[in-house]
Image (cartoon, rainbow, N blue to C red):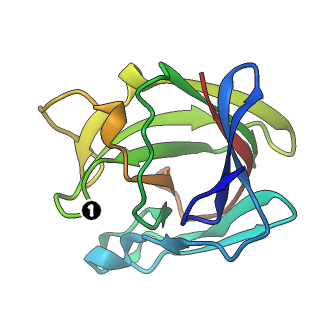
């Protein structure tokens, strides 16, 4: 087992679908990235415990807000041997966004949405070539994702509604 600096353990060959990112009991190295960066007042919390990452909080619309998110601290994730990521999640029926970043400085991420089923564990598959380049949540023109250059993961919720949210992630697998 190789430990990463993100409070995530990487198990090579642990599953038939490739590497598995499982959330261990180590201190989480994730941080909130909410609409407060632009004056909003949404809030989020991230906790890793019992092998699950929990992302919870409140989206608020005041001050042109409307999203809450979390992001892993920068590391190195070479995903070049995979064509997709599969996530095992339990949500609240809301749509969430998975983000991958290749630079901590340019403000762009590659992202795609996924749906959850309230109270049920489900698996979501996102093809890496389905992730679109965005800046501040808006799609922009630019290069396709280079999976060998991923340095962080992120999760975001922003459904243009003031609401509480709760998402659990059991694991993320490359396939």
Residue 172 image position (x, y, % from top left): 65, 40
Of 102 and 61, which appears nearest the observer?
102
The answer to which quarter of the image holds residue 7 is bottom right
Within the image, what quadrant is residue 64 found in? bottom left
Q: Is the residue 164 above or below the residue 141 in the image?
A: below
Residue indicated by mark 1: 104
Q: Is residue 11 left or right of residue 145?
A: right
Dot 1 falls on a residue whose secondary structure is: loop
Task: Indicate left or right for 40 with 14 as reference.
Answer: left
**Residue at the image point whose x is 64% and y is 72% from the top:** 28
Residue 24 relative to residue 156: left or right: right
The residue closer to the viewer here, 123 or 3, is 3
Q: From the top left corner, tell me how far across and down residue 122 is, in percent.
A: 79, 32
- On the image, the x and y values in percent for residue 38 come to 26, 75
Structural crowding at the residue carrying mark 1, measured as other residues with C-alpha within 10 Å and reported as few (<14), some (14–19) or many (≥20): few
Q: Residue at x 16, y 58 (%)?
A: 106
Image height check: is 27 above or below 136?
below
Q: Position of residue 117 (x, y in %)?
A: 77, 36
Which corner quadrant holds the C terminus?
top right
> Residue at 23% of width from left, 27% of height from top?
144
* Image label count: 1
Residue reaching furthest left? 141
Residue at the spot 77% in from the left edge and 27% down from the top edge: 15
Query: 165 or 63, which is in the foreground?
Result: 165
């Amino acid at each position: 087992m190789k430990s990463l600096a993100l409070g995530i353990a990487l198990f090579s060959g642990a599953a038939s679908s490739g590497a598995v990112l499982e959330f261990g009991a180590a201190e989480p190295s994730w941080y909130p990235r909410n609409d407060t960066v632009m004056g909003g007042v949404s809030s989020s919390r991230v906790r890793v415990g019992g092998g699950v990452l929990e992302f919870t909080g409140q989206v608020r619309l005041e001050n042109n807000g409307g999203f809450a998110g979390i992001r892993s601290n920068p590391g190195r994730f070479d995903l070049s041997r995979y064509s997709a990521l599969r996530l095992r999640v339990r949500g609240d029926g809301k749509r969430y966004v998975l983000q991958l970043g290749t630079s901590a400085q340019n403000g762009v991420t590659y992202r795609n949405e996924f749906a959850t089923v309230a109270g049920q564990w489900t698996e979501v598959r996102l093809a890496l070539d389905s992730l679109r380049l965005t800046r501040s949540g808006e799609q922009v023109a630019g290069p396709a994702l280079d999976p060998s250059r991923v340095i962080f993961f992120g999760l975001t919720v922003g459904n243009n509604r003031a609401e509480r949210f709760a998402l659990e992630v059991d694991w993320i697998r490359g396939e």
